[in-house]
Each structure stands twice: as structure tokens, then as C-alpha cells.
Image (cartoon, rainbow, N blue to C red):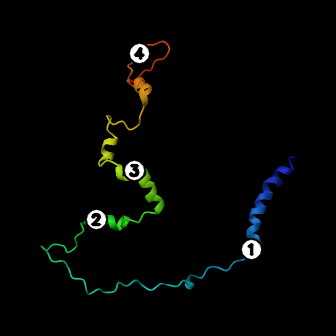
Amino acid sequence: MLKALPLALVLPAFALGGCALLQGKQAPLDEFAVARNAPLVIPPDYTLTPPVAGTVSTTTESAQQQAIEALFGGPSPRSQTETTLLQEAGRDRALIGARSVAGDPATRVVDKGNTTRAILAAGETQSPDAAAQPPQ
């Protein structure tokens, strides 16, 4: 057993190192074989005129709208499946401003039922069977 331990340690090292020995000698890289790309050149555009101070821009879009268009693009067409799903979900029946009232505590988003509402409305009790201690 004691003689097998060094063999068990050396054998994987030779197996991994042997891969490089079997490939042979490789030619060194030639640093002069690198091809250079032509430099980038911006072609002149003579149709543009510099802006004149005090004049209004001819574009009707605001800078914010242009940025949104550049980032996200225009509205993409919806697929037939997505359109059908939105119609079935009642897109045309949604109230305007529904997202504003969804976080309101008085808005009942889920129909809880009478039993659940009674449990939630119940006050604190000192019952020996069950008691909930709110964090202080």
C-alpha cells in the first residue's frame, strides 16, 4: 500500500503533462505576420449646416423622445396570440389609472371572502389556545 501511494500521485501528473509532450515543438508566433486594418475615415457631409444661435430646432421631437426611440425603438407589432390574449384579459375594459389605485390600502384587489375578512379584522386577544404577538 505504501509503495502504491507515490505511484498514485505521480501517474496523474505524467498523464496531464504527457499531452504537451506528444504535440512536439511548435513554431513560435511571428509578430510581423499581423495585418493592420486601414484607419477609419469619416467621410465629409456637406449637406449639414451648423445651428444658428437663437433659432428653433426644425425637429418636432423632444430630446427625451429621441432618446427613448434610440434606446427602445418604435412600437413593435404584436403577434396574433398576444393580441388575442390581451383581448381575453379585458384590455379594453381596464380603468384608466388602474395602476395608481392598485397600491391603495382601501382597494380590494383580491376577494378575500367573509371568513378571511373576519380574521383580519379581529383584534388582539390573550387566548391560551392561540396568540399572536406583533413585533415591538
Distance between the alpha carbons at the discs numbered 2 and 1: 60 Å
Q: Residues within 10 Å of mark 4 (few under 14, many from 20)?
A: few
Distance between the alpha carbons at the discs numbered 3 and 4: 44 Å
Q: Secondary structure at mark 3?
A: loop
Q: Residues within 10 Å of mark 2 (few under 14, many from 20)?
A: few
- Of the image marks 1 and 4, the number of the one nearer the N terminus: 1
Which mark is in front, 2 or 1? 2
* Amino acid marked by disc 2: Gln
Residue shown at the point (43%, 59%) measured from the top left = 83
Q: Secondary structure at mark 4?
A: loop
Residue shown at the point (47%, 84%) measured from the top left = 37
**Disc sitting over residue 125 in the figure:** 4
Rendering coords of residue 12 (x, y %)? 77, 58
130 vs 35, nearest the viewer: 130
Question: Which residue corresponds to mark 2?
Answer: 65
Residue shown at the point (44%, 86%) measured from the top left = 38
Is 61 on the left or on the right of 90, as rendered? left
- Of the image marks 2 and 3, the number of the one nearer the N terminus: 2
Question: How many tags in the picture?
Answer: 4
Q: Quadrant of residue 82?
A: bottom left
* Amino acid marked by disc 4: Thr
* Amino acid marked by disc 3: Gly
Question: Which residue corresponds to mark 1?
Answer: 23
Which mark is in front, 3 or 1? 3
Distance between the alpha carbons at the discs numbered 2 and 3: 29 Å
Question: Which residue corresponds to mark 3?
Answer: 90
- Of the image marks 2 and 4, the number of the one nearer the N terminus: 2
- Of the image marks 2 and 1, the number of the one nearer the N terminus: 1
Rendering coords of residue 115 (x, y %)? 44, 25
* Amino acid marked by disc 1: Gln
Rendering coords of residue 22 (x, y %)? 77, 72
